[in-house]
Image (cartoon, rainbow, N blue to C red):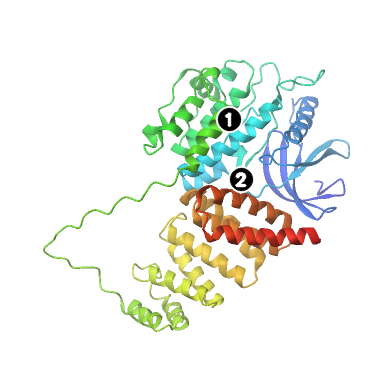
Amino acid sequence: MERVIQERYELLDLLGRGGMGEVWSAKDRQLDRLVAVKLLRSRNAGDDLTRLEQRFEREAQLTARIGHPGVPTVHETGRHKGDLLFIAMELVDGRTLSAQLKEHGPFSLALAATVAAQTADVLAHAHRIGVIHRDLKPSNLMLTGSGTVKVLDFGIAAAREPEPGQPRLTGTNEMPGTPGFISPEQGEGRPATSRSDLYALGCVLYEITTGQPPLTVPPGASPYVLILSHIKDKPRPATELRPELPDAFADLVMRLLAKDPAERPSAREVQEVARQWLSQPPPPAPSPPPPQVTIKNPGPPAPTPLAQQARGLMDQGEHAAAADLLRQHSGRHALDAPDIAPLSLALNEMLLTGEDFTRAYDGYFALGSALRKSRPSTDRDVLACRAGAARCLSELGRTPEALHEFEALLPVQQHVFGPMDRTVFDTRYEIAALMARGGQVQSARDQLTGLLADQQRVLPAGDERHTRAEGLLVRLDQFLRSA
């Protein structure tokens, strides 16, 4: 197959394959950057190639027309050697919501609200200029390393007010979209409207908050059975599956699933409700239960000799010796033992603070590997090890590796802690700083601008994170002016 398109785009890795073609990561030789290249390769018997090509070209036109930061930027579209259509566009570095859901389960409330607010903003903009997506689903929504939601695949999008003479792009009996996310009116054969996209958004939010779709059918059933269920059946209230959902947010999700399009909230209302939830401070931690009087209190188990020896070295300030001791015994004593793991985590932080970055990295890496054998990837100690190791890589000057680690860590932290947590803010700052160090100055500036806006919404004015981000932003502006 062709590996270079138009003598410019060098295809690297196949990212996905669908009904309309393939998506590849590629190197733009002219501008020395990575891009995504979508190719029309459908050559099945019976395909209406003219209509497929028209739809493919329409995707490029509508995606470019939207011009929203939540939609990948289209760089170029064209035809290669006469019969191969391509679209070169922004390469989105992130994970789809479906992949995130499969790996980590239902989203935190804050992350679900972030998805709701950002997706609704894209839809509001698209609808305002007359574009309807018609295939919104978790696999078409991607969460980037910086916490931005990107709406993908406008391949079957429709212009609400098409230009005169534009051809019909779906057949008479062809229903666009995915059965589990098709609105009742589309299932009945009526045209999709902006409220149809909002029904699909309701299906997405229901699934990422409860862990399951709003409506299901037995395995092996025809897709039309699922479509009929969306026409006639009422989903269980989301709070039955996720009791801690706030009433306002759960009500929003269920109203999006209304059978009557007129009863569904607008995209702007979705944004308002989601942002209200995001702006609320996290609930206070529950008060500890009152102490119970017992006759016998055996106390915690006695620490192992290894823990006692390591703690003694740490108390004497011999952090390097303590680290070496734990490393020497790690083969015979599990680092994830109850009395060793917290000790090792505290020791690694001391080594990092003391600028012994190599030992700290080795410690974080070893402890994280041990913990992952018995704990999930969302465990807070596992996340602390990943963050600590990434910080060490940064301090050791291994910028590309550190940036990669922080960008991979961020979506998991957002899922566990929520997007407005201080830990998440710290990681976002590290990503911006590493981008700047690697020469991506404008991208770093864009990251910092968004970070500052979010911090100012939830952090007190005196928080040092404001000063840190503002200081780096000033330095980047000075660099950009002098460049």
Query: Is residue 132 visible to the viewer in this orientation of the structure?
Result: no
Residue on which disc 1 sits: 268
Circle on res. 148: 2
Residues at marks 1 and 2 touching, judged by CB atoms closer than 8 Å: no
Pick whichever, 481 or 172, lies toward us. Answer: 481
Q: Position of residue 320 (x, y in %)?
A: 47, 82
Determine the image quadrant of residue 445: bottom right
Quadrant in the picture for the C terminus: bottom right
Q: Amino acid at mark 1?
A: Arg
Q: Is residue 393 above or below residue 322?
A: above
Q: Secondary structure at mark 1?
A: helix
Secondary element at tag 2: loop
From the viewer's perspective, tell me whether residue 392 is left or right of residue 303. Answer: right
User: Which residue is painted at 71% across and 43% down in the image?
Assistant: 23
Q: Amino acid at mark 2?
A: Thr
The residue that appears at 39% across and 72% down in the rendered structure is 343
- Would you say residue 237 is visible in this rendering? yes
What distance separates the C-alpha of mark 1 from that of mark 2?
18 Å
Q: For the point 39% across and 37% down, which residue is it? A: 242
- Residue 371 rendering spot, x and y as whole percentages: 43, 63
Residue visible at 43% across and 57% down in the picture: 379
Q: x, y (%) of residue 233?
A: 45, 20
**Mark 2 residue crowding within 10 angstroms, few (<14) / some (14–19) / many (20+):** some
Residue at the far front: name it. Answer: 461
Mark with earlier residue (1, 2): 2
Where residue 474 sits in the image (x, y, percent)? 69, 60
How many labels sit on residues? 2
Of tags 1 and 2, the one toward the viewer is 1
Left/right placement of residue 373 relative to residue 477 reads: left
- Above or below for 464 versus 75: below
Residue 413 vs 223, above or below: the answer is below
Asked if residue 215 is positioned above or below residue 435 in the image, the reply reads: above
